[in-house]
């Protein structure tokens, strides 16, 4: 199993047999062993074997009788020991929420009043959905019905499956109504996003001198997918990752030029530019002067009049 602290993989895990809905147990496919993401929703039901799940940047317990709700594009991993028994349900946004016309990466901002069925998915990083025996047996009954119906669909079967899925999600929403509503009132999803961007910013600060600093590395350190990080940067600060890094490198370069005597080539290296000529070209594009001339002009002291 790949530790959550290491760099995740980003291959889109399109593992569903159908584009709208698919249900399977652990025997159908080998469980993922590294952090990953996919474009569809996923629910995992733990039928046996206590384990943990990594969702975003947090680790939460995932014991027997627990359900995990995973949004599209959300980095996650559930560790499955050899004796673990589980069910996986994959489905598309249009299957669950055909009325909701929004980007999958904006689902965390959808009000629970508009789409209450999104609640467990939005707040999985904050709650453990562990059911009592009677409620869990009810969920298992719904899961068995979905699994029996899915392989041989007929006219109307899709709607029955969707109804069973909504019953399962609704059961969890009913059992966890108060903490879910409280998290929504406290804007927990937005706080998580701000925390993720803060972690990204800190990573960029520490690695600004690395010429290989990249969106992929920063996203991995932040426990986001590159797609998610790009989307959130545009929404929160209106910049791409490359624009943000260049802006910070130019700020660092100005500080080095005005507050030290290092040669331009060393300033370039300290700011993450392996090529001095490229650094000088980008600096001139932004400041109108090459680095050396910029330093001389800014530090020039006018003679004091007698």
Image: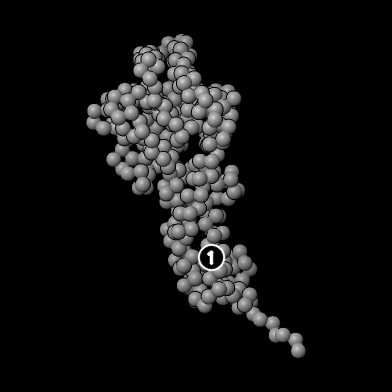
Query: Percent x, y for residue 255?
Result: 56, 69
Find disc 1 in the rendering and name its residue: 252
* Residue 150 visible (yes or no): no
Left or right of 284? Residue 39 is: left
Q: Residue at x 63, y 75 (%)?
A: 298
* Residue 61 visible (yes or no): yes
Left or right of 186? Residue 130 is: left
Q: Residue at x 35, y 23 (%)?
A: 65
Left or right of 301? Residue 135 is: left
Query: Percent x, y for residue 274?
Result: 44, 66
Give the farthest residue toward the left: 82
Q: Residues within 10 Å of mark 1 (few under 14, many from 20)?
A: some
Which is nearer the eye, 105 or 279? 105
* Residue 112 higher or lower than 76, as above or below: above
Look at the numbered disc 1 and give the secondary structure of its residue.
helix
Which is nearer the eye, 3 or 90? 3
Q: How is the image coloured?
A: one colour
* Residue 151 higher or lower than 228, as above or below: above
Left or right of 124? Residue 48 is: left
Give the farthest residue toward the right: 306
Query: In which quadrant is the N terminus drawn?
Result: top left
Query: Percent x, y for residue 235?
Result: 59, 43
Which is nearer the eye, 280 or 65? 65
């Amino acid at each position: 199993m790949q530790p959550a602290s290491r760099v995740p993989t980003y291959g889109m895990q399109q593992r569903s047999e159908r584009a709208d809905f698919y249900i399977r147990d652990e025997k159908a496919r080998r469980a993922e062993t590294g952090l990953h993401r996919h474009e569809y929703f996923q629910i995992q039901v733990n039928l046996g074997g206590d384990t943990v799940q990594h969702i975003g940047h947090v680790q939460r317990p995932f014991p027997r009788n627990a359900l995990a709700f995973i949004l599209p594009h959300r980095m996650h991993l559930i560790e499955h020991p050899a004796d673990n028994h589980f069910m996986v349900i994959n489905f598309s946004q249009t299957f669950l929420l055909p009325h909701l016309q929004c980007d999958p990466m904006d689902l965390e901002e959808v009000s629970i009043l508009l789409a209450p069925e999104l609640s467990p998915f939005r707040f999985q990083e904050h709650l453990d959905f562990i059911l009592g025996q009677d409620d869990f047996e009810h969920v298992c009954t719904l899961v068995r019905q979905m699994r029996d119906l899915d392989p041989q669909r007929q006219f109307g079967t899709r709607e029955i499956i969707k109804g069973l899925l909504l019953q399962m999600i609704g059961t969890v929403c009913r059992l966890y109504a108060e903490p879910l509503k409280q998290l929504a009132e406290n804007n927990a999803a937005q706080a998580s996003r701000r925390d993720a961007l803060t972690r990204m910013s800190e990573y960029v600060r520490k690695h600004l001198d690395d010429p290989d600093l990249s969106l992929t590395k920063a996203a991995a350190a932040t426990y986001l997918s590159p797609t998610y990080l790009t989307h959130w940067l545009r929404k929160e600060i209106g910049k791409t990752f490359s624009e943000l890094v260049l802006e910070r490198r130019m700020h660092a370069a100005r500080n080095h030029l005005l507050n030290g005597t290092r040669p331009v080539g060393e300033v370039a290296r300290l700011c993450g530019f392996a090529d001095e000529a490229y650094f000088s070209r980008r600096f001139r594009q932004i400041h109108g002067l090459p680095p050396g001339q910029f330093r001389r002009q800014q530090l020039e002291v006018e003679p004091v009049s007698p």
